[in-house]
Amino acid sequence: MNDTTPLSWAQTAPRLVAVAAGRSTADTVIRNGIWVNVHTRECLPGHDIAIAEGRIAYVGTDASHCIGPDTEIIDADERYMIPGLCDAHMHIESGMLTPAEFARAVIPHGTTSMFTDPHEIANVLGLSGVRMMHDEALMQPINIFTQMPSCAPSAPGLETTGFEISPEDVAEAMSWPGIIGLGEMMNFPGVINGDPKMLAEIAATQMAGKTVGGHYASPDLGSNFAAYVAGGPADDHEGTCEADAIARVRQGMGLMMRLGSAWYDVETQITAVTEKGLDSRSFILCTDDCHSGTLVNEGHMNRVVRHAIACGCDPVVALQMATINTATHFGLEREIGSITPGRRADIVLTSDLETLPIEHVIARGKTVSEKGKCLVECPHYPWPDTARGTVHLGHSLTETDFEIAAPKGANSARVNVIGVVENQAPTQALVRDLPVDNGLIEGQGDTFQIALVERHRATGGVVNGFVSGFGYTGRMAMASTVAHDSHHMIVVGTDCAQMALAANRLADVGGGITVFKDDVELALVELPIAGLMSDSPAQEVAAKAQAMMKAMQTCGCTLNNAYMQHSLLALVVIPELRISDLGLVDVTRFEKINLIRTDR
Amino acid sequence: MNDTTPLSWAQTAPRLVAVAAGRSTADTVIRNGIWVNVHTRECLPGHDIAIAEGRIAYVGTDASHCIGPDTEIIDADERYMIPGLCDAHMHIESGMLTPAEFARAVIPHGTTSMFTDPHEIANVLGLSGVRMMHDEALMQPINIFTQMPSCAPSAPGLETTGFEISPEDVAEAMSWPGIIGLGEMMNFPGVINGDPKMLAEIAATQMAGKTVGGHYASPDLGSNFAAYVAGGPADDHEGTCEADAIARVRQGMGLMMRLGSAWYDVETQITAVTEKGLDSRSFILCTDDCHSGTLVNEGHMNRVVRHAIACGCDPVVALQMATINTATHFGLEREIGSITPGRRADIVLTSDLETLPIEHVIARGKTVSEKGKCLVECPHYPWPDTARGTVHLGHSLTETDFEIAAPKGANSARVNVIGVVENQAPTQALVRDLPVDNGLIEGQGDTFQIALVERHRATGGVVNGFVSGFGYTGRMAMASTVAHDSHHMIVVGTDCAQMALAANRLADVGGGITVFKDDVELALVELPIAGLMSDSPAQEVAAKAQAMMKAMQTCGCTLNNAYMQHSLLALVVIPELRISDLGLVDVTRFEKINLIRTDR
């Protein structure tokens, strides 16, 4: 691994002092900009910034004394100079991109720091996968801090992941150079109930002096919430309304407000600041999950800040929420998050604070983007074969693997069906009476088959069931190795032969997403890294993902976020009914149930 | 050492979670108070606080579920519940009290956390003295964090201290449990000039992840200030006007505003918040130096917060400046500074936020004061003989040690005289023509003799000179082993015999302050620990100090802060003229000069 982390303030102080004093010359000077000061909440025209060794040496009204013949001069031309933007919590895998390609996609949007939880790869490759993500993160020209995943599996006993994360893993990871804390502690019932394993993970993080990420996905703000807070999580991004926001901040948590590709939690919570007037220092912006298409077409943290401003937030306050507030939360306020001496020189030039055009991006003192173009290399980690070949089927699948036998002699069968709900993550637990043909239960109307294909240990396991709500027609199948959170393979189809084709295709290409119709592949998104990510550029992945979603429509699907609905069908922590490698799971009672009901 | 630091959040989390969830009962519950929330800046009536293991387990509208038969109930009776107050920077030695007795004096004033720089003892006893202060600090029932002194001597080459502090000392101290950072980096010219030793001390602190205290005592806000900031100091308490405050905060520093016994820097700087509207998060309150009399008669951090409010600051904002802002600055926001789960249960009950009567003080979950009485033990460190016997004179002094020989045959002599200036720390460099009698130069009018008596290495050295401005009359002398910063012995007198009496007296008692008149001791303050501190209660020390100052008046002194003026006469870092063990020092040019001038 080539760790590009810049020299520390301590290491560079002699040079920084010399530049500020005028005894040495700066590497770069930005002249005549409006200094957006996130400490004081001021916009100060007529300021210069001198940079040396990738850090800020001087900010003042005249840096002439820092300029020598070799100093690069950047004319800010009276534009605003804002700190590089920080994404306080996110999963790189959600972009279907490796850290390098994710970085390349977001640099032109002014993102210079990300706090990333490689939770998905942890389920597939365990601690070694986390380490690969961490290592590629440290190779990038921007700051990518890694949060050690806390909850793999997400639902112990209800699914089998490729690997599990233990408290010992967490303790070990805390010594890695790029680890900033613990990833979201999703097992909130575990914390509330005093689960020793969860508390041990939190303790290992706290004892390392690092930040424990939270995830409290419940509207209950009573004693359960209180118990969760008492357990140690220092932030939360699962709030969805003003009351959630206020409760979290009052209890001393950092309140992370999400605007992801499919999360819209800023507008409903930021009123705690804009209307209720709460001190804004604990309010932080993040994306959590962004698809490559969002990154290509809409932006990243610049999109979130713009949105916060559009929601009525003062622009400098909104910028604080994406800079100094984030840095302070993670104990990095003397390292990133403001344009002040000693900090990494992560600076964005923009001509307007409300529309926030990202015109020039400087990271660690170097220009990394101008006018929307990434101008810097984002090196790739040498992903080993173990990371590239993660789709292990026990055998080549045939249509018989997907056949669902009816009880002997039955003409029809009453079954439990996963009901997809438009625009919602929770599913419905439906009951349907389905016809039997040749001893096999068949789909009917908008109810088709779903299969969870084991792909971590080549057990050959296929769990079959039924799903409703996609609107598919004709002979088709869609398969994906992105299958939160255990990331086996989810296959949905109207026809067992198409399902086998799709599943085998993903085994052949090492993972990804495919759509088959009438024996023809309509679309393929190759995700060779862990079956989750591509190391191709975001534009290419976004185009393929777009084509994949179009293929779903071609097959008759009418849902808004059809692919996301597909990939969440195995998420056995969100109600009501899901599928895992162990069977159908009733997520209202956290227990397995049978596919075929006996209550007719 | 008996370290009373409470169990960590990680260690106590299982219990805290159980209490919050209602599965275990709290040790203490405070009922029905107004929760002053320094995260949101709200006052929330009708709240309860549940405490277990010295930490806060639950804050909410009803802690009934946390109460068992053994739970102590404290009725807040609709009073305000504010976080225990924090003093962000201070020198315990200034109170002439040991850490234990200082703690006992300030607990009834609501102080539960102090960030202390034992700079004075470092000059007398070096690293071992710092360790003793650190160890006694950790024995106390409140939180006393130690800042490792950075600058002993303060003025290398111009004075000889008992011990010197090296970068290696700093690096070693960073591993001690109670060290929170580096004490004020007073050698600002050293930092500006890139002195490797000063930068090494800063680097050792930063690399340990701790906070570098600053001290920039100059009105120059140009490139010198910029260079100092670039060197790494993270805060400063030497600002005296609004422009100082704004400059420091804009540059990313914590701005510490002082109200000490003789420092009045809050009113002149807080307008940056109250009038200019700057974000207040970087503004912090501290005392720096408080005499025992101030502690006994006026208060401690409660006095500072009251004063900030009287200056027009919103009460909750003022409280933030003495709680969460301080905690965040030192990276302790998940440990102290707010009333939220997981934090140490440091809580003050008060019936009025503006006058701030301190009615009930809880530290680490235990009641430590009610109605102005300290109800808890503050254990004493077993100070060794090396700390108690620090006044080492080479021999018993006689009046001849203080005689100042005139140039041979002279009838008068032109001499450099230290001119004390009423109500100011800087002195004036005066020139006086003095008479000669019997070959000795004699004082005249308001110009008397001053002597710096070496007391660390028993060299027998006595440096004699003249001082003007005290207004003494008759035959008297005053001596003190508090002599910033090297803490030799300063003797001022109108008569050589009285001077010898006073100096020998302090050698006999192991240090302190004494006033002699006509061969009779008018007052004595014994300071047996390092010649700087008493391990008697604050009331006793304050009474003796009061008697000492009265004795100075009896001798004719008319100055407002006569004792402080006396003890600062050897402070060879503040202009214009001072005395050290090496001679007279011109502090405008940082060089030694002769007593007797040749320019007549």
Image: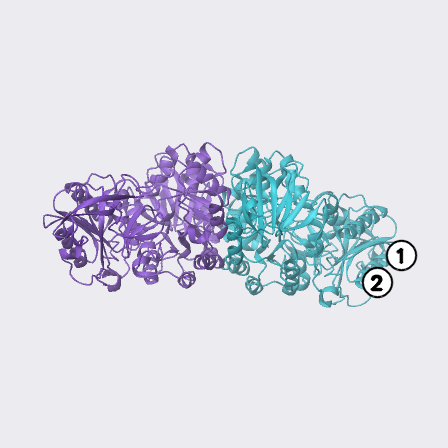
Chain colours: A purple, B cyan
Q: Please state, as top left, top right, bottom left or bottom right, where the N terminus of chain A lies in the image.
A: bottom left
As helix, strand or loop, the secondary structure at mark 2 comes to: helix
Q: Earlier in the sequence, mark 1 or mark 2?
A: 2
Q: Position of residue B164 (x, y in %)?
A: 63, 63
* Residue displayed at 79% across by 52% down: B540
Tell me where residue A496 appears, x and y as whole percent.
Answer: 14, 52
Q: Is residue B101 visible?
A: yes
The answer to which quarter of the image holds residue A171 is bottom left
Amino acid type shown at disc 1: Asp
Callout 2: few (<14), some (14-19), or many (20+) C-alpha neighbours within 10 Å?
few
Q: Residue at x 85, y 61 (%)?
A: B399
Q: Is residue B135 left or right of residue A455?
A: right
In the depicted view, which residue is nearer to us: B592 or B436? B592
Residue A38 or residue A163, whichever sits in front: A163
Which chain is indicated by disc 2?
B
Mark 2 = which residue?
Answer: B400
Q: Is residue B162 visible?
A: no
Please determine if labels 1 and 2 lie on a single subunit.
yes
Q: Nearer the viewer, mark 1 or mark 2?
A: 1
Rendered location of residue A589, percent (x, y) = 36, 49
**Could you tell me which secondary element the residue under label 1 belongs to?**
loop
In the image, residue A232 sits, relative to residue A263, either above or below, namely below
Which residue bears the numbered disc 1? B519
Identify the image quadrant of residue A361: top left
Q: Nearer the viewer, residue A339 or A261?
A: A261
- Give the distance between the C-alpha atoms of the residues marked 1 and 2, in whole angstroms: 16 Å
Image coordinates for residue B180, horizontal then vertical, percent: 56, 56
Asked where in the image residue B509 lies, by quadrant, the reply is: bottom right
Q: Is residue A84 left or right of residue B48?
A: left
